Amino acid sequence: MFKNTNQGYGWVAIGLHWISAITVIGLFAVGFWMVELTYYSKWYQVAPHWHKSIGLMLLLATVIRIAWKQLNPKVSKAAEHKAWEQKAASIAHGLIYMLLFTIMVSGILISTADGRGILVFDWFELPSPGLLFGKEQLFENQADIAGLIHQYAAYSLIALVVVHGAGAIKHHFVDKDNTLKRMLRPE
């Protein structure tokens, strides 16, 4: 029940999916709210610290999720899905992972553009990637360029998440198949 089978997802994959979904939506909401904070807000320092820390934990969870996916049997596609639906789902899942990594890497580049590392929940510090090359920034205007990428990738991801969720709801209520049920409990 913990591992995936050819017929369905196990508890680990299901848990990682929903933790990731809730975290992505939460980080988007907090990020959207954070850009309006002023220097005098009590959240000006606290919110970015939590946003970065949770974002880096999501990066770790995403790497674990991909590794788990590779170590488990491939869950077969639902036979009742049309070929175009299977292709669209495959493309959407690939784009979701690509956007997640784009957002997380750009977030790291924003936060380390001044050469400082990222303190994660006061547990450890992720060093600045620039320090690997003996400089503060990896490229000119790192914070601004990475910030734009971070913003547009986040908007794109949320749009794709809405489409992904709408597809699952359509399969559940219109097609009445087990697409959504497969991600709610092991079969």
Image (cartoon, rainbow, N blue to C red):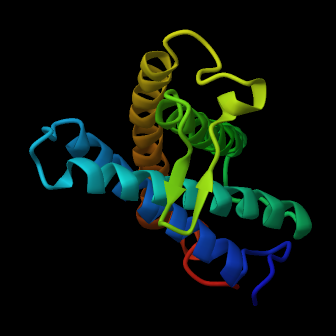
Q: Residue furthest top?
A: 140
Q: Nearer the viewer, residue 27 or 99?
A: 27
Q: Residue furthest front?
A: 134
Q: Residue furthest bottom?
A: 1
Residue 64 x, y percent position in the rendering: 74, 64
Residue 116 x, y percent position in the rendering: 53, 38
Q: Please tell me whether residue 35 is drawn above or below residue 14 in the rendered image.
A: above
Q: Quadrant of the C terminus?
A: bottom right
Q: Please tell me whether residue 78 is drawn above or below residue 139 in the rendered image.
A: below
Q: Can you tell which quarter of the image residue 76 is in?
A: bottom right
Q: Residue at x 45, y 51 (%)?
A: 52
Residue 13 x, y percent position in the rendering: 69, 72
Q: Residue at x 70, y 43 (%)?
A: 90
Q: Residue at x 80, y 76 (%)?
A: 4
Answer with left or right where residue 109 lies relative to residue 82: left
Q: Please tell me whether residue 162 is drawn above or below residue 36 in the rendered image.
A: below
Q: Nearer the viewer, residue 36 or 112?
A: 112
Q: Residue furthest left?
A: 40
Q: Quadrant of the N terminus?
A: bottom right
Q: Is residue 168 visible?
A: no
Q: Nearer the viewer, residue 31 or 90?
A: 31
Q: Please tell me whether residue 12 is drawn above or below residue 158 in the rendered image.
A: below
Residue 135 x, y percent position in the rendering: 66, 22
Answer with left or right where residue 13 lies relative to residue 51: right
Answer with left or right where residue 7 lies relative to residue 53: right
Q: Can you tell which quarter of the image residue 37 is in?
A: top left
Q: Residue at x 59, y 33 (%)?
A: 102
Q: Is residue 130 visible?
A: yes
